[in-house]
Image (cartoon, rainbow, N blue to C red):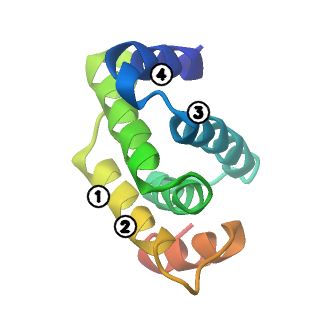
């Protein structure tokens, strides 16, 4: 339900950006969120960093940044707990996604772990 709301929010409020990149970012973030949930990790910022990194690699920086901001707006309006630190962790992940030596989920995970312990 949360992902559906997030998708609708993005597509309704930002129709000119509802491109393949945005759809890719939503689907990819949803997939990797499930992957990290199976690991029973407690460090929220690590998750934000890792997901932003791998989604940035797979789908591009702009759509990934958009869904990260949309997620925090959703939290702000009652969907969760909004935190500036979440946005900063997303930014760190996006920066990592632009490095040539980071190319997959495992590499994103290990680099984010340096900043945010699992």
The span from disc 2 to disc 3 (Cα, nearest Å) is 22 Å
From the viewer's perspective, tell me whether residue 73 is left or right of residue 101. Answer: left
The span from disc 1 to disc 3 (Cα, nearest Å) is 23 Å
Residue 92 numbered mark, or none:
2
Picture quadrant of residue 28 = top right
Q: Decide which of tag 2 and tag 3 comes sooner along the chain.
A: 3
The local crowd at label 2, few if under 14, some if 14 to 19, many if 20 or more residues have their Cα within 10 Å, is many
Marks 1 and 2: in contact by CB < 8 Å?
Answer: yes
Q: Decide which of tag 3 and tag 4 comes sooner along the chain.
A: 4
Q: Quadrant of the N terminus?
A: top right
Figure check: 8 above or below 99 = above
Question: x and y percent of residue 98 in the render?
Answer: 46, 73
Question: x and y percent of residue 24 in the render?
Answer: 62, 40
- Name the residue at 30% across, 50% down: 87
Residue, disc 4: 6
The span from disc 3 to disc 4 (Cα, nearest Å) is 11 Å
Figure check: 82 above or below 65 = above
Residue 88 numbered mark, or none:
1
């Amino acid at each position: 339900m949360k992902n559906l709301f997030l998708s609708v929010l993005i597509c309704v409020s930002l129709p000119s950006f509802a491109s393949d990149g945005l759809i890719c970012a939503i689907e990819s973030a949803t997939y990797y969120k499930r992957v990290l949930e199976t690991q029973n990790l407690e460090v929220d910022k690590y998750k934000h960093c890792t997901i932003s990194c791998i989604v940035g690699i797979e789908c591009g920086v702009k759509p990934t940044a958009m869904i990260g901001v949309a997620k925090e707006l959703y939290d702000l309006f009652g969907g969760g707990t909004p935190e500036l630190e979440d946005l900063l962790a997303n930014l760190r992940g996006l920066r990592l996604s632009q490095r040539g030596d980071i190319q997959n989920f495992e590499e994103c995970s290990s680099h984010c772990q340096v900043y945010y312990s699992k």
